[in-house]
């Protein structure tokens, strides 16, 4: 998608959003009057250092937390006013989530983990196993379907996490530091995978990270500092520039080599 | 989520922490046993009591004794109003022949065999069968027999043996039937009452009076049963109308004038209730009609039931306490599970699991613990009951409380087994309410939180 001609429809619209925590008698402003429109099909990266408020913003976008002021509209609906139950159903239908620490159910196999969102939707077993198998093949884990999380590497676990986030083809996928626990090579793999999957179905992907290199995969980079949105710039996604990516990977690998002895 | 998925998730969670589940289930098992077994003992006690009372007499029978009550005569009108009480199956007055002189029955040529007929009872023919009288020979007296020329009667099963041979001397004047050993066949009486015409003779009240005689026909012989009445063994029964007719003719022939002020009613009556449960009310209603002197097994039954109930209550109370302990243990297990699975619950919420389903998962898990405990508890109770009965029967060894019945110490009817499981499941569900509530309150943010 060409970022110079952004689609008109904002799937996510953040309006005058503030989040203030009370710690004892002190007021901590985590988000200060954020305004942001995110368009369908965009790969957006929210970048900030730890404590900048980027994670808080993601929580607001996904409806995990209520704002102190302002509102978040998704598809024109004010999710800030939703009840817990409405939010659950809303997430069930429109939202996928990739976690930093993968958050797979330890007792379940990869295949069962990927089925979870479909199970919550009430999809019959046969249909959801089919869909989950397809999703696992998409992330290259066809041979790991019956493994439990403890039997997989971090990269594999995160790929299961990605399959789980995309399996129900949600309109929006949120990713919270998705590569925070991964090495460089796996990071590149995972990022490419997420961008590719969201492109395939014209899904909106919102990634939160502190890592500028990750941000390179986004169409648009939003920077947050001290709860304030300080920069919002378009970017040509690294995933669409394979030659640059290759160079980056080689550079990363050689630096790893140097660091080794 | 589909119900099958909910159940699958719950079973997976329970098997994941096997040991804890088993320990919690054991608590419920003990609780269930402590409720089912005591109740089974109580049921056995009341069943045994009932059998014992049945041996003593008919539990649905009320006897009214109105002797000496001049205010409320137990006359036909009173009998009718007793018949109208709901729960009454049949009612009959009981009347004895009132004759000043001797009353005899004769049989055989020239009245060779005679019997001092001091036990001739009049009661309503239609009541006999319903009161539980049975025949050993011939047929039962019916209302159709009333008023026939030869008066039709029933004999007790030893009545014919009570006739003496006037041509012989003591002790050869009687058929010896009492020294017959058990299992041996009885000798025949002097005559077959069903085939023999009998004469019923009421001697005059005064000297020079005329004796009154009637011809009798025996239609059947009762099966002797002291619980029903002495007349079924040594006596004769005719319909009360026939008895009254004989009485009137006797009084007419002897010029007896009845004392007008005397109580014209019957002295006694028997009331049969539809079932045991009606006895108390019917008896009360009879008292309300003015007949306060009644007798039934009800009072004894009530007393026995009451003591059985008290034993049950005490044992059941112990069971209740054990069940509370296991409820606390289920609650503890489930609460621990919520804390352990806080992150999982958060993840489920982020992935779109509805609150209702989160609540359902924890409730069903708690309910399953209760259910499994109930089923296992029932099985163990059945085994325990079997052992108790086995031990009980060797202890009693023939000297059972009630002869002719094997006395059981513990009885578990199907309803008790079902109640045991249902109660255990309910205890599980109730114990799960609070943990499930806490699970629902877990924030979706727990999924993001990194340890």
Image (tube, grey):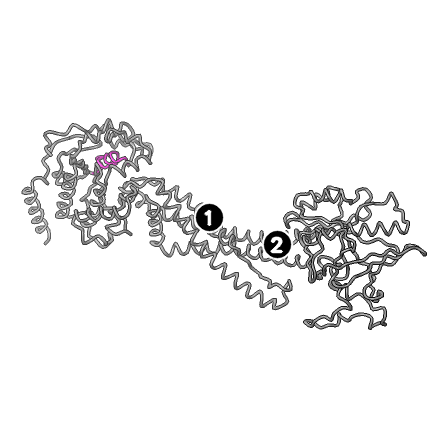
Picture coordinates of residue B336, whole percent (x, y): 38, 48
Magenta span has B118? no
Judged from this view, the residue extending furthest toward the right is B208
- The residue identified by callout 1 is B427
Residue at 71 percent of width and 73 percent of height: B181
At 87% from the left edge and 55% from the top edge, which residue is drawn?
B212
Q: Does the magenta portion include A57?
A: yes
Residue B246 located left or right of residue B58: right
Determine the residue positioned at 19% across, 43% down: A178
Relative image position of residue B107 (x, y in whole percent): 81, 64
Region of the chain picked out in magenta, as a range: A50-63
Residue B308, labelled with which disc? 2
Front position among marks 1 and 2: 2
Note whether residue B243 is visible.
yes
Where A175 falls versus B410 (above or below)? above
Residue A55 higher or lower than B146, as above or below: above
Q: Is residue B230 visible?
A: no
Q: Residues within 10 Å of mark 1 (few under 14, many from 20)?
A: many
Please name whichever residue, A50 or B253, is drawn nearer the observer in this view of the structure.
B253
Q: Quadrant of the C terminus of chain A?
A: bottom left
Label drawn at residue B115: none
Chain under callout 2: B
Q: Do discs 1 and 2 share a chain?
A: yes
Front residue of B400 and B149: B149
- Residue A213 coordinates in the image, percent (x, y): 12, 40
Chain letter of the residue carrying label 1: B
In the picture, the quarter occupied by the N terminus of chain A is top left
The x and y percentages for residue B26 are: 44, 56
State the CA–CA distance, disc 1 to disc 2. Answer: 26 Å
- Which residue occupies the foreground of this view, A151 or B85? B85
Name which quarter of the figure residue B354 lies in.
Answer: top left
């Amino acid at each position: 998608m060409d970022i110079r001609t952004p689609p008109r429809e904002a799937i996510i619209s953040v309006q005058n959003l503030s989040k203030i925590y009370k710690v004892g008698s002190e007021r901590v402003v985590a988000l200060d009057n954020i305004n942001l429109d995110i368009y369908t099909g965009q790969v957006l990266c929210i970048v900030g250092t730890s404590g900048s408020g980027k994670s808080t913003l993601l929580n607001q976008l996904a409806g995990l937390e209520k704002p102190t002021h302002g509102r978040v509209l998704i598809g024109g609906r004010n999710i800030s006013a939703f009840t817990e139950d409405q939010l659950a159903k809303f997430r069930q239908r429109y939202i996928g989530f990739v976690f930093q620490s993968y958050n797979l159910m330890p007792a379940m196999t990869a295949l069962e983990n990927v089925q979870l969102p479909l199970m919550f939707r009430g999809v019959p077993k046969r249909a959801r196993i089919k869909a989950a198998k397809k999703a696992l093949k998409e992330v290259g884990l066809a041979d790991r379907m019956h493994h439990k999380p403890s039997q997989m590497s971090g990269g594999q676990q995160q790929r299961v996490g990605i399959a789980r986030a995309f399996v129900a083809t949600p309109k929006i996928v949120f990713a919270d530091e998705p590569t925070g626990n991964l090495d460089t090579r796996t990071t590149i793999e995972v990022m490419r995978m997420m961008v590719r999957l969201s492109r395939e179905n014209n899904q909106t992907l919102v990634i939160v990270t502190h890592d500028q290199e990750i941000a390179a995969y986004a169409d648009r980079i939003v920077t947050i500092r001290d709860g304030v949105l300080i920069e919002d710039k378009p970017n040509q996604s690294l995933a669409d520039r394979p030659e640059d990516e290759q160079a980056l990977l080689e550079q990363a690998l050689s630096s790893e080599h140097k660091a080794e002895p | 989520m589909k119900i099958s998925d909910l159940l699958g998730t719950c079973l997976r969670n329970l098997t994941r922490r096997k040991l804890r589940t088993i320990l919690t289930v054991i608590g419920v098992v003990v609780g269930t046993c402590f409720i089912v077994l005591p109740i089974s003992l109580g049921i056995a006690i009341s069943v045994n009591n009932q059998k014992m009372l049945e041996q003593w007499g008919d539990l649905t029978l009320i006897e009214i004794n109105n002797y000496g009550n001049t205010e409320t005569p137990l006359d036909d009108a009173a009998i009718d109003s007793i018949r109208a009480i709901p729960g009454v199956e049949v009612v009959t007055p009981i009347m004895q022949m009132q004759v000043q002189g001797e009353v005899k029955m004769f049989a055989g040529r020239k009245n060779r065999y005679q019997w001092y007929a001091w036990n001739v009872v009049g009661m309503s023919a239609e009541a006999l069968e319903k009161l539980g009288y049975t025949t050993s020979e011939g047929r039962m007296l019916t209302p159709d027999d009333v008023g026939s020329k030869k008066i039709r009667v029933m004999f007790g099963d030893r009545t014919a043996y009570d006739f003496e041979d006037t041509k012989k001397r003591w002790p050869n004047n009687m058929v010896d039937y009492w020294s017959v050993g058990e299992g041996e066949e009885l000798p025949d009486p002097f005559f077959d009452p069903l085939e023999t015409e009998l004469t019923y003779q009421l001697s005059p009240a005064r000297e020079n009076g005329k004796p009154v005689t009637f011809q009798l026909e025996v239609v059947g012989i009762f099966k002797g049963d002291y619980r029903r009445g002495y007349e079924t063994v040594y006596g004769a029964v005719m319909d009360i109308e026939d008895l009254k007719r004989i009485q009137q003719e006797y009084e007419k022939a002897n010029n007896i004038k009845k004392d007008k002020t005397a109580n014209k009613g019957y002295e006694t009556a028997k009331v049969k209730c539809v079932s045991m449960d009606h006895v108390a009310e019917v008896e009360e209603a009879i008292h309300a009609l003015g007949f306060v002197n009644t007798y039934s097994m009800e009072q004894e039954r009530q007393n026995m039931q009451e003591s059985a109930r008290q034993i049950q209550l005490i044992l059941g109370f112990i069971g209740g306490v054990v069940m509370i302990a296991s409820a606390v243990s289920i609650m503890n297990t489930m609460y621990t599970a919520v804390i352990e699975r806080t992150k999982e619950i958060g993840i489920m919420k982020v992935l779109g699991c509805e609150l209702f389903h989160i609540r359902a998962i924890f409730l069903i898990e708690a309910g399953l613990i209760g259910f499994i405990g109930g089923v296992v508890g029932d099985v163990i109770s059945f085994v325990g009951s079997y052992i108790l009965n086995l031990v009980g029967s060797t202890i009693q060894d023939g000297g059972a409380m009630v002869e002719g019945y094997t006395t059981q110490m513990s009885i578990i009817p199907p309803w008790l087994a079902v109640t045991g499981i249902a109660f255990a499941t309910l205890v599980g569900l109730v114990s799960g309410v609070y943990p499930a509530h806490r699970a629902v309150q877990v924030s979706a943010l727990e999924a993001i939180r990194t340890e």
